[in-house]
Image (cartoon, rainbow, N blue to C red):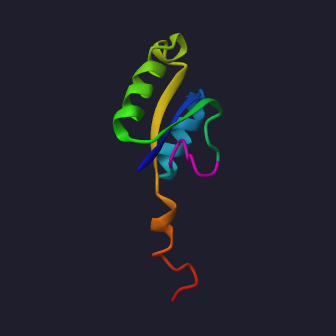
Amino acid sequence: MRFLIVRTEIRTVADAEIAAAWTGGRRLRDEKSTPEPRRQVVHAEDRDAALLLARALSAVGAVRAGRHRVKVLPIEEPAAWHQYRWDGG
């Protein structure tokens, strides 16, 4: 399985936004609608390589200071996509 290792900026959130999300029962951060800005993207062919790259990116000063975060995202193999039918059949 392949992986993407992504270093993103952490968006700051105002106290009013936190309160509104808490009372409204919604998520504060929704990566599907408004993803965090990407700073660096790296590709790895296996899990061990992905974790090694993630550790290396975690040593960046902005990550250690809490301004950026590192995410490891699995990517499905294209062959696995063919087993699903999107037309409802």
Task: Residue 62: give x, y in percent of width and height.
Answer: 54, 14
In the image, 31 versus 61, the foreground residue is: 61
Instruction: Name the residue rendered at 50%, 47% in the picture.
Output: 27
> In the image, is residue 33 above or below residue 88?
above
Q: Is residue 76 magenta?
A: no
In the image, 74 versus 67, the foreground residue is: 74
> In the image, is residue 18 above or below residue 56?
below
Left or right of 12 on screen, residue 63: left
Left or right of 21 on screen, residue 38: right
Q: Most extreme residue toward the bottom, as rendered?
A: 89
Magenta residues? 27-33
Magenta: main secondary structure: loop
Q: How many marks do you count on the picture?
A: 0
Instruction: Name the residue rendered at 43%, 27% in the picture.
Output: 54
Left or right of 16 on screen, residue 45: left
Instruction: Name the residue rendered at 41%, 50% in the picture.
Output: 1
Q: Most extreme residue toward the left, as rendered?
A: 48
Task: Residue 63: give x, y in percent of width and height.
Answer: 49, 18
Instruction: Name the residue rendered at 54%, 23% in the picture.
Output: 68
Task: Residue 35: give x, y in percent of width and height.
Answer: 62, 42
Task: Residue 31: give x, y in percent of width and height.
Answer: 56, 46
Quadrant of res 10: top right
Quadrant of res 6: top right
